[in-house]
Amino acid sequence: MKTLFIVSGHGRFATALQSSIELIAGPVQDIYFVDFTAADTEETLKEKFSRIVQANQAGSVLFITDLLGGTPFKVAAALAVGRQGREVVTGVNVGSMIEAILQRETLPVEQLAAEMVAVSRKTTQHFRPAAGRPGQTPAERGQGI
């Protein structure tokens, strides 16, 4: 039940996210990182997404975009609406991507999308130093990776 991922965003968002994910989790398969650059249009982005879906004969597809209402989101939404097995998540972060990669073979695409949103909410935090010695770093207090 592996879900095909298509990740896109403005500028080099997608390939920058790919670089971060691969640094942390290693190379990933069946994930396509599609940048939306100044040279692209809504139509060229739609063509790129459509080619990926068709080439992979994808059953379930999760479109992952950077910004609600942006062109990558609008194109993904247009390709997903009314089609079973296609979902769109927007406002992604590295933590939610890694979690989705780990769960994409076990969860259906609808649950995977919901889990990404839940993980994004959990991993987006306002850092406030905990009590400790003055000058103590988060790592010294046992916080962080």
Image (cartoon, rainbow, N blue to C red):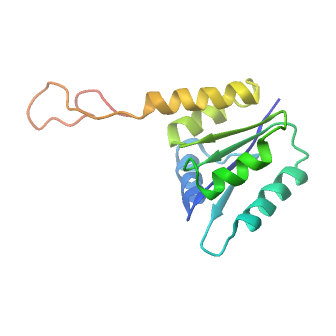
Q: State the quadrant of the N terminus.
A: top right
Q: Is residue 66 above or below residue 82?
A: below
- Which picture quadrant has residue 130? top left
Q: How many marks?
A: 0
Question: Residue 142: where, in percent of width, then height?
Answer: 28, 27
In the rendered image, the residue lying farthest to the bottom is: 39
Against 108, residue 34 (above or below) is: below
User: Which residue is at 67% across, 71% downward?
Assistant: 40
Quadrant housing residue 48: bottom right
**Residue 31 visible (yes or no):** no
The answer to whether one can see residue 79 in this image is: yes
11 sits left or right of 104 in the view: left
Q: Which residue is drawn at 63% across and 58% down?
A: 71
Hey, which quadrant is residue 88 in on the image?
A: top right
The quarter of the image holding the C terminus is top left
Apparent side of residue 14 relative to residue 133 in the rendered image (left or right): right
- Specify the farthest residue to the left: 134
Q: What residue sits 76% from the left and 66% below the top?
A: 43
Q: Which of 118 and 31 is in front in this view?
A: 118
Percent coordinates x, y for residue 82 in the rendering: 83, 37
Q: Which of 90 and 138 is in front in this view?
A: 90
Q: Where is residue 7 in the image (x, y as percent from the top left)?
A: 66, 50
What x and y, as percent, mark residue 25? 58, 41
